[in-house]
Amino acid sequence: MRLRAGATALLACCLAAWACGSLDTPTIPEPTPQPGTPPASTAPNPGPTPTPVLGAPAPKPTPTPEPGATPDPSATPAAPTDSGGCGDPLPGALAQVNVKVHQRGDNHWLLDSTPLVGPDAAYCAKIGFTDGRSMCPVRVEGHPEREACELYVTGRARDTGRSGPTWYADGALCTGRPGCENHPDNQYQVIAYKNGLYKACGKNDVCGDVIVAR
């Protein structure tokens, strides 16, 4: 009787252990791939597409200068090649010719002329006139560039071709006695033999005058 009871208890224990093992979570089988579907690749992409940055400006190409482009008007102009030795600062255009009686003789007067530029107080101050004048000669007296700068603004006499103004006496060129004649060494001077209105004119037809009344 005791043996039957022991066997029954052992059988009950075995059944309980089998039931506990059968409660484990069953293994879910992997899905079977469909025919024709390529397997997903797990290898890294050797050339990934960069993610666009929103709002970033696109780079602008460098403009190619066109041949014969217009020069910048604000640039500093170079001195003209025909300045004839008159350097910086170059004088402006002839604005006035100052004519005066230089010497008074018994039978003739000697007249003298000085070309003036302006009104330009800054230019006058830059070349050495510190009295505030705005009309001035092209260079101070004795400056090595004075002759070249006077030629630059005055030009050459129409009758002699020398550097300096063209002289007139009552509208006629000075060709000698009995009227007037150009000084033999200085075109800026003339010898007046007769009375009248004397003019000295530059290349731009700016003239200065003086009356001779001996």
Image: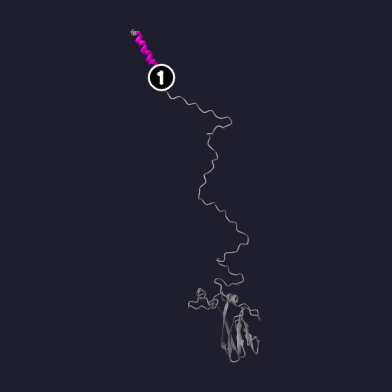
Of the 4 image quadrants, the one containing the C terminus is bottom right
Residue under numbered circle 1: 19
Q: Residue 189 appears at what percent x and percent y? A: 60, 83
Q: Residue 1 appears at what percent x and percent y? A: 34, 7
Q: What stretch of residues is rendered in magenta?
A: 3-15
Q: Is residue 70 left or right of residue 14?
A: right
Q: Residue at x 60, y 85 (%)?
A: 199
Q: Residue 11 colored magenta?
A: yes
Quadrant of the rendered structure where residue 155 is?
bottom right
Q: Nearer the viewer, residue 112 or 31?
A: 31
Q: Residue 55 colored magenta?
A: no
Q: How many marks?
A: 1
Q: Is residue 197 left or right of residue 28?
A: right
Residue 186 appears in view: no
Quadrant of the rendered structure where residue 64 is?
bottom right
Q: Residue 93 appears at what percent x and percent y? A: 58, 76
Above or below, 45 relative to 114: above
Residue 113 appears in view: yes
- Name the main secondary structure of what is drawn in magenta: helix
Q: Nearer the viewer, residue 119 or 2?
A: 2
Quadrant of the rendered structure where residue 172 is?
bottom right
Q: Amino acid at mark 1?
A: Ala
- Determine the secondary structure under disc 1: helix
Badge 1 local density, few (<14 within 10 Å), some, or many (20+)? few
Q: Residue 120 appears at what percent x and percent y? A: 52, 76
Above or below, 35 relative to 67: above
The residue furthest left is 2
Question: What is the basis of the colouring in this image?
Answer: one colour
Q: Nearer the viewer, residue 159 or 199?
A: 199
